[in-house]
């Protein structure tokens, strides 16, 4: 079978004219034209090129193609705030919760003597938070990976919580939002050795 030429491949693609509404603006403007195999559905999140950066936006409306231009669509999208990924992850994590109550965070420490595995357990939670952030911060967020890491982080957090004296740390390690490195440094128990800082990131 003969290979398709570049022109033939291009002819099979849908032409999507992207009209982006920025945060804080009432009206949208056309910012780019994308050639896509499939037209994104209303509610889908896509990436839009804007000047020298890329923003994530949610599809709000898709125009009907004009006669003679069946593969040409105008796609209206609304820019999403930088925090929407964290909100989405929190919602997914709550829906996927394995049924164990996070109320363990309000428990008093089980013993005045720290559990022997406390440091290792907190290190595991901290590393999972780092991996969660990396999964979400890459150009195309990997929500599935972030959810897996966050679920493991919460399991470790629930095991460590009864032995953590600081209330703020106990609440955060069983929560649904990953902590930043600055939070970990600020809340890390003074009685435990401070872990080495991650070599590839430093976020707030």
Image (cartoon, rainbow, N blue to C red):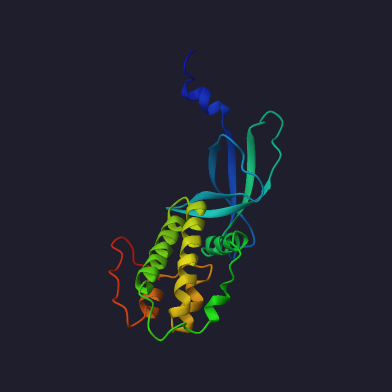
Question: Where is residue 192, by image quadrant?
Answer: bottom left
Image coordinates for residue 117, horizontal then vertical, percent: 37, 71
Image coordinates for residue 148, horizontal then vertical, percent: 49, 56
Is 140 above or below relative to 124? above
Q: Residue at x 38, y 84 (%)?
A: 113
Q: Give the residue furthest to the top.
A: 1
Image coordinates for residue 5, horizontal then vertical, percent: 47, 20
Q: Residue at x 49, y 65 (%)?
A: 155
Q: Residue at x 59, y 66 (%)?
A: 24
Q: Nearer the viewer, residue 183 or 103?
A: 103
Q: Nearer the viewer, residue 99 or 113?
A: 113
In which quadrant will I find the C terminus? bottom left
State left or right for residue 113 relative to residue 56: left
Question: Where is residue 71, by image quadrant?
Answer: top right
Q: Nearer the viewer, residue 204 or 18?
A: 204
Tally of marks: 0
Q: Residue at x 51, y 52 (%)?
A: 144
Image coordinates for residue 52, horizontal then vertical, percent: 42, 53
């Amino acid at each position: 079978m003969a290979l398709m030429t570049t022109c033939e491949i291009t002819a099979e693609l849908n032409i999507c004219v992207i009209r982006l509404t920025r945060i804080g603006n009432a009206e949208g403007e056309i910012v780019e034209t994308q050639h896509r195999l499939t037209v994104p559905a209303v509610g889908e999140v896509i990436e839009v090129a804007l000047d020298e950066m890329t923003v994530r936006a949610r599809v709000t409306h898709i125009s009907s193609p004009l006669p003679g231009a069946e593969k040409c669509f105008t796609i209206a999208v609304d820019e999403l705030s930088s925090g929407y990924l964290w909100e989405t992850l929190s919602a997914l994590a709550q829906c996927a919760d394995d049924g164990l109550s996070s109320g363990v965070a309000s428990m008093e420490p089980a013993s005045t003597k720290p559990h022997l595995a406390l440091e290792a357990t907190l290190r595991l939670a901290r590393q999972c938070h780092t991996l969660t952030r990396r999964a979400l911060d890459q150009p195309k967020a990997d929500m599935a990976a972030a959810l897996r890491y966050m679920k493991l982080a919460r399991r470790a957090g629930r095991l460590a919580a009864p032995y953590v004296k600081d209330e703020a740390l106990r609440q955060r390690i069983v929560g649904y939002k990953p902590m930043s490195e600055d939070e970990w440094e600020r809340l890390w128990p003074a009685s435990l050795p401070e872990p080495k800082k991650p070599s590839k990131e430093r976020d707030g």
